[in-house]
Image: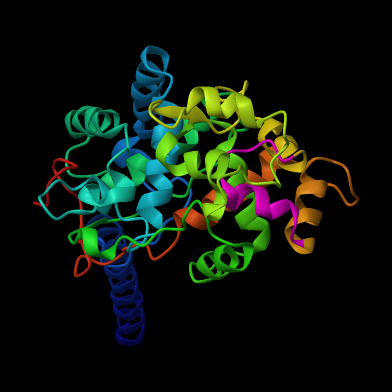
Amino acid sequence: MSRGYNLLFILVTFLVLVAAVTAQGNRGSNNGGGRRPRFGFYGNRCRNVESIVKSVVQSHVRSIPANAPGILRMHFHDCFVRGCDGSVLLAGNTSERTAVPNRSLRGFEVIEEAKTRLEKACPRTVSCADILTLAARDAVVLTGGQRWEVPLGRLDGRISQASDVNLPGPSDSVAKQKQDFAAKTLNTLDLVTLVGGHTIGTAGCGLVRGRFFNFNGTGQPDPSIDPSFVPLIQAQCPQNGGTRVELDEGSAGRFDTSFLRKVTSSRVVLQSDLVLWRDPETRVIIERLLGLRRPSLRFGAEFGKSMVKMSLIEVKTRLADGEIRRVCSAIN
């Protein structure tokens, strides 16, 4: 009798300890103590997170199509500075938003509206960093791109400084681009694939005008550009005017491989894009993504894979490093 009682006591104690550990683990996933980005992270705590974000993005992209590439670009700018932590969303006189490369970003109101709706549905649960990551995926899908699953569970960063913004530039060499991407744990396939995202969106004339009028101070266009392409861009970005020009001329609203095909024919506006066709390694990748070389790669599928990798750069997972903001433009 005594022995049976002792065994029962031990069994009950064991079960209680297991339950306690499990509960602690669950609390950790809620408060950031042990959270890690994963598929289905929010579960029953915010079952409609993806549909709410999609609805908001869809509404804004339909009313202003430029919001699609704007959100995609914002996500890239966020992840390449202090990781994917929504720091680019923070407002302030010296925040990342004030840095020169970020002054033309658009779509902040989209993320903020999604956050407002999610705060009503599931308060203090979904981070702004996760909202931006989902919105970037939805922006691609809404312009014809392939859908991919997004791991969630990022925390929002508390630091946003313009002085930290050091992004890949429009005149970078292939070597510099490879170096910058490798520093963020992205390989050359990721580099080429993500640059393929230039199939939607525009560039400011100030970034491209020099190549088409006075390349390296020669007074002439960049000789590597297709000569028939030069007058088209000169007309859109004259020396004394113009605002923005399509990155994928004639197809900037459709997410497809059109941009990569234009790279092969030297009909792209950014020098950093054009040089990818001259480098042996990046050229082979472009050919594979276009089905011109075997084994071929499917651009849509590869883009999704690279976006997932990028979205996991330096994510915040502990409350010591991040939080769930109430509004995306300010820390709590």
Residue nearest the viewer, comparing 6 with 211? 211
Q: Is residue 171 visible?
A: yes
The way the protein has been coloured in the rendering is rainbow
Q: Is residue 146 left or right of residue 136?
A: right
Q: Does the magenta stretch include residue 278?
A: yes
Q: Is residue 295 above or below residue 145?
A: below
Residue at 63% x, 38% y: name it: 268
Looking at the image, residue 32 lies above or below residue 73: below
Highlighted range, magenta: 266-279
Which of these two is toward me, 75 or 242?
242
142 versus 153 height, above or below:
above
Q: 151 and 98: which one is in front? A: 98
The N terminus appears in which quarter of the rendering?
bottom left
Q: Which residue is drawn at 36% across and 81% down?
A: 7
Residue at screen point 57% across, 51% down: 218
Is 157 in the magenta?
Answer: no
